[in-house]
Amino acid sequence: MRTLLLGMGNPYLSDDAVGIRLARDFKSWLEGIPNLDIVEECSVGGLELLPLIEDYQRLVIIDSTKTTGGIPGKWYYFTAERLRETMNLTNIHDANFVTALELGRRLGMKLPANSEVHIFAVEIADSLTFAEQLTEALQRGYPQYSSEIFNCIVELIASPPGFLVPVNVLSHAAGRI
Amino acid sequence: MTRTISIDPITRLEGHGKIEIFLGDDGSVRNCFFQIPELRGFERFVVGRPIEELPRIVTRICGVCPASHHMASAKAVDGCFGNEVPPVAHKLRDMYYHAHFIHSHVAHFYALAAPDFVCGPESDPAVRNILGVVAKVGLEIGGRVIKARSMAQRIQQLLGGRTTHPVWCLPGGVAKGLKKEELNEIKPMVKELAGFTEFSLKLFHDVVLKNPQYVDLILNGPYTLDVQFMGLVDKDNAPNFYDGQVRVVDFEGHEICKYQPDRYFEHVAEHVEPWSYLKFPYLRKRGWKGFVEGINSSIYCATPLARLNVADRMATPRAQEAYEGMFKTLGGKPCRALMANHWARLVEMVQNAEMLERYCADPEITSDKFRVLPQQITGTGIGIVEAMRGTLTHHYTCDKNGICTGANLIVGTTNNNAPIQMVTKKVAQTLIRPGKEPNQGILNMIEMAFRAFDPCYSCATHTLPGQMPLEVSVYQGGKLQHHFKRGS
């Protein structure tokens, strides 16, 4: 099963870079695993994503999110079957991610099924300030949430199609959506 | 007592934009505000960095128009080094930029503008998207859109080495030239893109112009503003997206000013309102007069339509033909009907494709004289290009060691901040009347007002969700009276 791991965000926009940072860190451990490709830094959304994810059977996305009342450092897991918006899976100038996926499928592109699009989204504090550092809250929580997400991704990659990250490994997370 | 209607793009994300409409006792719209948060600290972020790094950094401001920032920044940095950029480098940059324009305009037209017309402005939001367009016009359209975008992107990759976030422009030119084999790969794609731009124009004619209701909406609806127009032009006053002088023309067609980019601060100033993070540029010499229309207003639009309004002609023959046809239908030039921005984008795309054809036939384009090394530091540089959604200014200063000491940016959407406010209010006042509750159709028609500007708040502010899901709350006497949402 060909899998693509995408780190999404803006490297210069403080916490928005958390997906990129996680993907970079994970790459050093995951590189060399058969049928796994890793793109540590992806800053595009909408239709732009289609050529990137074509011909993969499974997609793992690490992104940031900012929810009302959310606690920075908590994280969420969901698939495209129950997609909620994250910071970089949306694009005001383009189609949104769900529409882009649907259009691609109708056009005959070989794209992963919604159940095979796995999204890990970390709650962030600041994505409006230009900075190369994470905020203190994200930095402090990094060892915890990075190891939790890493363990989930390892299990996911090792599992057959249809696998969902089980709820019991999400005890430190905000929950599965 | 007033009621408040809030239109919020998806509320699960903070940092979103929203429209607040205030109703009076009689149910008519008293006021309307479009609010968005702004990114902070870019000027501080770049201070202290080597000035030549900025063209690479600014592409990260925005994932939608990185090439626009890259080009404006490169020109500003050229100024900081006092470089004479070789002609072929200018041509290559311009060529790259035409491909980028097509890439962007295709997305806006087919994913954002066309659904309003093909599916209808009051159609179900669930189908008012590119899938709805494909369902109505045919699956083949979707394939052509994807292919056109990927070809435009491939051309950028062949020229600049990568598709997004280019690192190609350097002080004094570009990092790589164009090889003959790369040019040979580009040529057939350009031919196909030229056909696609003509096809898009025909689609607009067939779907929009053959529908009298849409023509009436464009010409006689509330989507008009009596404000001035700004755009970059060449020596013949034809639109130029990469280089030239900034020309400002009033809505009766009289030239207000025309200036070199390095004089921009004599002509443009920025007003601040306490209720918005985003500034409101205006014509400095006229002074800030408020959000008012009229021949003496200091408010201007910087959009595709504005670019055609300030131009005396197009730079290429097929675009000229399309330009003449457009203004003939619209009743002359300048045109104040903001919905014609969608049409103007398609006319611009024709020029983009023709310019690509022109460069493909230019024997100098594969020259290896694509860069000169900087020999001096002047300390100041100003670069202006036309971003897809408006005039984009980068202004830098640096010390004698080439370390950045200051930066100022006026991005395309910021130029249009005041007219977006004004037309949003105007449309709301027209459509929401006493006794008529807003519905999905009306809300979309309000959205259409600012969608005509192709606003991109990724750089003016932060990313918003695609397709702008909305929430509407109607309050009266401080209590929620009515609430519904769509999207998300």
Image (spheres, helix red, strand yellow):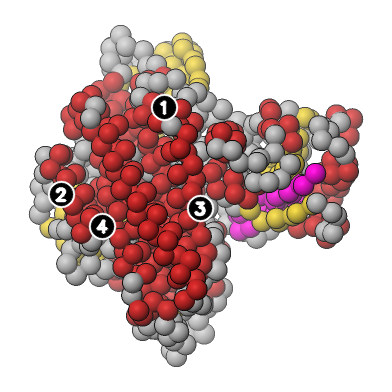
Q: Residue furthest top?
A: B435
Q: Disc 1 versus disc 2: distance between alpha carbons? A: 29 Å
Residue at mark 4 to residue at mark 1: CA–CA distance:
35 Å
Residue in front for this viewpoint, B178 or B232 = B178
For the magenta stretch, what is the residue range? A1-23
Q: Are marks 1 and 2 on the same chain?
A: yes
Spot occupied by residue B211 in the image (x, y as percentages of width and height): 24, 27
Same chain for marks 3 and 2?
A: yes
Q: Residue at x 37, y 69 (%)?
A: B360
Picture quarter containing residue B396?
bottom left
Res A123 → quadrant:
top right
Alpha carbon distance from label 3 to label 2: 30 Å
Q: Residues within 10 Å of mark 1 (few under 14, many from 20)?
A: few
Q: Earlier in the sequence, mark 1 or mark 2?
A: 1
Would residue B44 be counted in the magenta stretch? no
Query: Label 3's element?
Result: helix
User: Rounded to the nearest whole Å, what is the CA distance between mark 2 and mark 4?
Assistant: 18 Å
Judge depth for marks 4 and 1 and give the one in front: 1
Disc 3 to disc 1, C-alpha distance: 23 Å
User: Quick check: can you spot residue B316?
Assistant: yes
Question: What residue is disc 3 on?
Answer: B150
Residue under numbered circle 2:
B324
Residue A103 is situated, as x and y percent measured from the top left of the image, at 54, 35
Q: Quadrant of the N terminus of chain B?
A: top left
Say which amino acid is labelled 2. Answer: Glu
The answer for which chain carries disc 4 is B
Instruction: Identify the residue position indicated by label 1 in the image.
Output: B136
Is A14 included in the stretch rendered in magenta? yes
N-term-proximal mark, 3 vs 1: 1
